[in-house]
Amino acid sequence: MTLHELNEKDVIQVKTGENLGRIDDIVFEGQQITQVILRGRSRMFGMLGRDDDLFIPWTAVKTIGADVVMVDVEIPPPRPARSHRGWV
């Protein structure tokens, strides 16, 4: 399986059913995959930046199916939006 093929699959949190996004990159140590990286979602069409990237350990990947990648990992809560001067 290639990175491109992985990138076409949604990553789903097993416990909550939440769609976390898609795999954007893979981290290797030697010849072993150690993590997958999901890029943070953009806020307000990217004008307010992005959420933090998600680094998911490869051991948390439970199943790679035809359409989805199932992971069992605790996702930290999103950080609160920063208020800008004059913005609510």
Image (tube, rainbow, N blue to C red):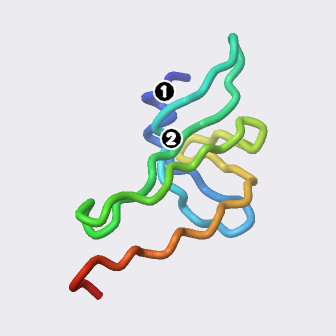
Q: The N terminus lies in which quarter of the figure?
A: top right
Query: What element does badge 2 sit on?
Result: loop
Q: Give x and y (percent) for residue 49.
A: 32, 59
Q: Outermost residue, top direction?
A: 30
Query: Which residue is labeled 1 in the image?
Result: 3
Q: Give x and y (percent) for residue 72.
A: 75, 53
CB under 8 Å between discs 2 and 1: yes
Q: Give x and y (percent) for residue 9.
A: 50, 44
Q: Which amino acid, by three-letter code, is at mark 1?
A: Leu
Tell me which residue sits at (38%, 58%) in the image: 50
Q: The C terminus lies in which quarter of the figure?
A: bottom left
- Residue 82's quadrant in the figure? bottom left
Mark 2 Cα-neighbour bin, 10 Å: few <14, some 14–19, many ≥20:
many
Tell me which residue sits at (71%, 42%) in the image: 61
Q: Give me the C-alpha separation between circle 2 and circle 1.
A: 8 Å
Drawn side of residue 8 relative to residue 60, left or right: left
The number of numbered badges drawn on the structure is 2
Residue 83, compared with residue 79, is above or below; it is: below
Drawn side of residue 61 relative to residue 49, left or right: right
Which disc is residue 23 wearing?
A: 2
